[in-house]
Image (cartoon, rainbow, N blue to C red):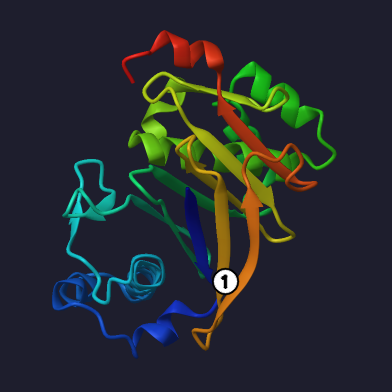
């Protein structure tokens, strides 16, 4: 099965004025500050267009906010999705066929060296060792942090449960106490690091970009099972030991 990652690269504030959305979404948006309002509406516009492109659903289905603050479709039979923001960029990840999704995006070098070093303190020794072995320290920290955030969004835990997750990037493995069967792919572009956490059955990730004129552009497809999917791309999968330790899941 496949998943779909689309990102908006224009100015959310400009585009938001011209959108047609369900009334309940517009009512929610009116309660937000201007900057957040634009990103909120763009995310739901892209989600609606993904549902139309992938499932042929013409109207954005009803949404709820889960107890962890994450939006989801009210109808549990509809697919899982995840939303992320980085600067003016808005991203939406949509899973297929009952899969799970967790998305995070970070601007490269948006944080100071001091902040990056503080982030390092929350990481495991294996994660820190991998970062220190890379040529670009700040990019490497951002990759590991983005990977972590995307996985924690998939599990529904958030940053308060950092200790429930261990990454082993040198071995291409991860271990989540809460959700033992996950894969994640993270790519470092010149200005953006993004990470998609997905169910293990996901075989392909379709990447899209939407410009300020709302034109969709296909970027590339990531074949999740290929050993080399990009020179600056990390793919981590759950440890086989962890899978066997949780046969009921």
Q: Quadrant of the C terminus?
A: top left
Name the residue: 45% across, 26% down: 181
Q: Residue furthest right?
A: 135
Name the residue: 19% across, 48% down: 76
Q: Does 17 sit left or right of 88 as displayed?
A: left
- List the residue tagged with mark 1: 209
Image height check: is 199 above or below 175?
below
Name the residue: 52% across, 67% down: 7
Q: Nearer the viewer, residue 21 or 75?
A: 75
Image height check: is 199 above or below 195?
above
**Can you give x and y, in whole percent of width and height, for residue 136 in the image?**
80, 42
Q: Secondary structure at mark 1?
A: strand
Name the residue: 78% across, 28% down: 132
**Can you give x and y, in whole percent of width and height, for residue 54 in the image?**
40, 66
Q: Residues within 10 Å of mark 1 (few under 14, many from 20)?
A: some
Q: Nearer the viewer, residue 211 or 145?
A: 211
**Can you give x and y, in whole percent of width and height, for residue 247 in the image?**
37, 13
């Amino acid at each position: 099965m496949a998943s779909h990652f689309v990102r908006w690269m224009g100015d959310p504030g400009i585009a938001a004025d011209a959108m047609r959305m369900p009334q309940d979404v517009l009512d929610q948006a009116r309660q937000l500050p201007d900057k957040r309002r634009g990103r909120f509406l763009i995310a739901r516009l892209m989600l609606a267009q993904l549902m139309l492109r992938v499932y042929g659903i013409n109207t954005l289905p009803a949404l709820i906010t889960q107890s962890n603050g994450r939006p989801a479709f009210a109808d549990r039979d509809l697919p899982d999705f995840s939303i992320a923001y980085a600067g003016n960029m808005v991203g939406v990840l949509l899973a297929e066929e009952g899969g799970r999704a967790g998305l995070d995006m970070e601007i490269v070098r948006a944080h100071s060296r001091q902040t990056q070093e503080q982030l390092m303190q929350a990481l495991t020794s294996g994660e820190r060792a991998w970062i220190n072995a890379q040529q670009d320290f700040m990019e490497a920290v951002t990759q590991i942090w983005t990977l972590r955030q995307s996985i924690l969004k998939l599990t529904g835990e958030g940053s308060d449960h950092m200790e429930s997750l261990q990454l082993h990037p040198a071995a291409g493995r991860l271990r989540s106490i809460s959700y033992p069967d996950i894969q994640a792919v993270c790519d470092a572009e010149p200005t953006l690091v993004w990470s998609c956490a997905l169910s293990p059955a996901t075989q392909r990730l379709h990447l899209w970009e939407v410009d300020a004129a709302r034109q969709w552009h296909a970027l590339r497809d990531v074949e999740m099972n290929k050993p080399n999917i990009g020179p600056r791309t990390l793919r981590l999968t759950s440890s086989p030991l962890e899978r066997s330790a949780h046969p009921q899941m």
